Image: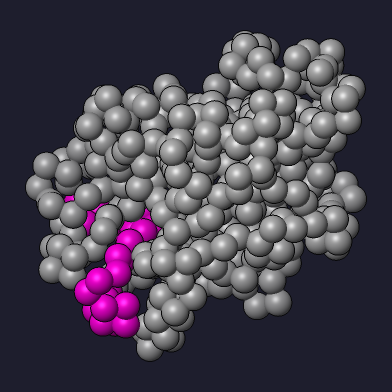
Amino acid sequence: MKIDRLETIHLCFEYDEGFTYAGGTCSARVTTLVLVHTDTGAVGIGSGYSHPGLMELVLQHQLAPFLQGEDPTQVEALWEKMYRITRWYGRKGAAMTAIGALDTALWDLRGQAAGQPVWRLLGGQRSTCPAYASALLWNDVDALAAEAARHIENGFRRVKMRLGRSSEYDVAAVQAVRQAIGPDNDMLVDGSMRYNNQTAREMAAQLETHSAFWFEEPFEPENLEAFTSLRQDVRVPLAAGENEFGLQGFKELIRNQAVDIVQPDASRCGGITETKRVADAAQAAGLRVATHSWSDALAIVANAHVISNAPNGITVEVDQTGNPLVEQLLNEPLEISDGQLALSEAPGLGVSLNQAVIESHRLSDPFNLANGSYSDMVFGPDFFRPAGPYV
């Protein structure tokens, strides 16, 4: 089996109303799918979460010719080749994301060639993975409580909420969500990078009182010193990593003893290969791993294949904001029961793409992305409306 060609598919979904968060109001979502076609007819699929134009440049205008004719099952060797080719402008950001999208597709092909699901090739023994509902954006406190209860009714046992709006709001929201989900379910908290040293400690005390499962990104990711200092003073576990790329980036988190839980994402940090390396490094340091996913269902599945087999793996993130790139992209919708995401026994990633959804949301020109707030990426000054200072 040899690689014949790469196909890139860029998708965009626009909300009718969107949701409010620390960055303003999210108006749309975007992701890139990569299909690796082979001379045998087998096709591997992966995804990457970055600007579609940047993904197109790296994937089709540089990496594609270097992969043509290669054996796709030589995943690690091809990862190193792609990394060397893009090192001068890469190592982080869009280049690493593009490598990761291809890497995930190669793992899919490796599993198909072996007749085994990826989770088993990675050494896993179980075809399920713990998952949490990720939503609970800035909203009326009563509405947050009702939403949290609905996620529990839908089969989740963990929910994640976004804080960092104001001290008064944060305290009320934590109390309401904890009451809504009860003591036997887990409450995860994202600090939205909105705290300083003092307010982070004050909020951590509140989270300890209400048995929060983790406190994610209270500070901007570059401020490792603040993470390290806070971790020494509080008991609620600290989590971070969605803004990090590659094993070398996560080694900085680990070396600085900044967090208790690292959060790589196969669709951002370098694919299944690099996510597995991050999980292994975290395990060696006595830390846990819980993957970030905020782009599409394929990314969630790829992350789950890693977490399901990792001894230190905790959970995967499942976007619950009404995003069809998560809810409808796969012909086999994500199934959550009693807090567990089901993984297929089929070879490779065990999923296929819903062509109707792809055609409905396909971007005709990845270099001509409409201005908007894409949750993590903002284009056009009219859409740059971050929240004011934390009160």
Residue 34 lies left or right of residue 258; in this view the side is right
Q: Position of residue 144 (x, y in %)?
A: 41, 80
Q: Is residue 377 visible?
A: no
Q: Which quadrant is home to the N terminus?
A: top right
Name the residue rendered at 88%, 30% in the picture.
41
Seen from this angle, which residue lies furthest bottom?
142
Q: Indicate whether 358 appears above or below 365.
A: below
Q: Which residues are magenta?
A: 172-200
Q: Is residue 238 visible?
A: yes
Q: Quadrant of residue 185?
A: bottom left
Q: Position of residue 143 (x, y in %)?
A: 43, 86
Name the residue rendered at 85%, 55% in the picture.
355
Q: Which quadrant is home to the C terminus?
A: bottom left
Name the residue rendered at 32%, 30% in the picture.
282
185 in magenta: yes
Q: Position of residue 347 (x, y in %)?
A: 67, 37
Q: Quadrant of residue 210?
A: bottom left
Name the residue rendered at 26%, 59% in the picture.
213
